[in-house]
Image (cartoon, rainbow, N blue to C red):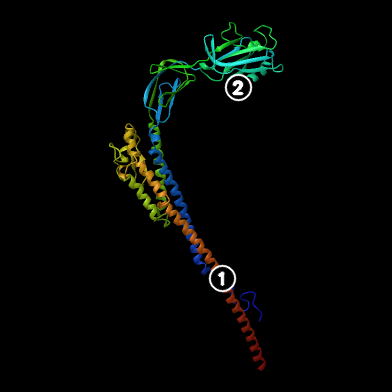
Amino acid sequence: MPTISSLGVGSGLQSESIISALMSVERKPVELLTAETASIKTQLSSVGKLQSLVSAMSDKAGAISSVTLWGQTAVTSSDGTIVSGSTTTGATPGRYSVTVSQLASSQTVTTATALPSSSSQLGDGVLQIELGTWNGASFTGSGSPVSITIGSDDTSLASIRDKINDADAGVTATIVNDANGARLSIRSDATGAENGFKITATENVDDNDATTGLSVLGYDAAVVGTPMALNQSAGNAKAKVNGIDVESKTNTLTGVSDNLTLTLTKETATPVEVVVASDNEAVKAAISEFVTAFNELATYIKDQTKYNAATKTGGPLQGDRTTIGLQWQLRGVINQGSSASSTWSRLSEIGITMKQDGTLTTSTSALDDALANPEELRKLLATDGADTGASGFMDRFKDLGKAVLGEDGSLETLHTSLEAHIERNDDRQDQMEDRLVRTEARFRAQYEALDTSMAKLNALSSYVTQQLAALG
């Protein structure tokens, strides 16, 4: 008999349906393994988020433990429109009385006579600009003069302005237009008495008239009737700080006291009170950020480990010993008193308490009272003691985060274990799939043989029936 090519034709059995049902039973272990892998991947994702939240909490605790935070100071001014200030780490708290008699200024000179327009021609020659200090009519240069050649094609007021600006001579030229015409104004780029300047104008063809040609751009305070008019002299800022005369070439008094910088914006004879004090707002903000990070972590642990009675399902980490252990460790940090401060021993004494749901809440008034004693507060929060009992609370939280996230930490170990479990499941699934292919091939071979045998028996039955009929 030829081989049966379509299962069930020879025997009349529903072989394909039978094999499909048998394979469905054989595939059950694979389906269970797939479901288990999906569940582990959910757990892995939850552990990854947990690690991220622990890291954030540890970082915020570390920020409070940092000496940088407790070294910060803030500056307040009785009139910030006149004097303002800023500090860097290490500034000493103090009070300063500041009066401003003069603001720093740049020298400005302008052509005395207006020209019809910016395209008006002056003449060719050389402008020499020298920076330095004016003392009355006496000028002391501070560097090499800059020579600017004005060619026959560059004699318009606009062209001369551009040539001056391109020369990098420490001054800037602009053209000011009004109803009378156009004037060239030249201003030193920097403030301060040392940034005055002198301009020497030399014409290629000198008509000996200072009011015509390129000569109109000359300025020398020692020369009576110098062509350009002085609008403003270069000068230093002058102030009194606690009765002491101070000067600066800019309106910023850098390092006027240890790590203190004052900025002057207006002259005044009335003293402005500037106070440098510990930056309590920075400490409060850091504590608030830590409490927020802690609460996000505590809430996440609660959500991931809870059991929903209505759906009869647990969170991805419900019953996980590592996660529950972390929850108890967090509470343990708070519950153990600290000997770091001689004033307080618990967070609740400075206004940070734990609610029934495991999150923290802060009493603003209690924390403000604690900030009145910043050194003891720093000890309670930031001390790196010889042991846990002698350490500050934020130092403990920082160390806890590092411990559970480290290479041998509980969360890192759990994460690694889950990844290894997934890999093992994938390997087992591949092996099962190979076995299922062989099993289905075996079933098909068996039913194919059955079909062939049934076909032979059916043919023999028909032959016997025919022979019996012939005998009759």
Mark 2 lies on a secondary structure that is loop
Residue 340 image-quadrant placement: top left
**Which residue lies at the image location 43% right of the left edge and 45% below the top edge?**
55
The percent position of residue 137, horizontal first and vertical second, equals 54, 8
**Which residue lies at the image location 44% right of the left edge and 56% below the top edge?**
417
Judge left or right: residue 356 versus residue 9: left
Image height check: is 120 above or below 384?
above
Quarter of the picture containing the N terminus is: bottom right
Judge left or right: residue 220 versus residue 373: right
Q: Amino acid at mark 2?
A: Asp
The percent position of residue 70, horizontal first and vertical second, equals 38, 34
Tell which of 461 and 52 is nearer to you.
52
Q: Which numbered tag is attached to residue 168? A: 2
In whole angstroms, how far apart are the C-alphas of marks 1 and 2? 86 Å
Quarter of the picture containing the C terminus is: bottom right
Q: Which numbered tag is attached to residue 438? A: 1
**Of all residues shown, which one is farthest toward the bottom?**
471
Residue 223 image-quadrant placement: top right
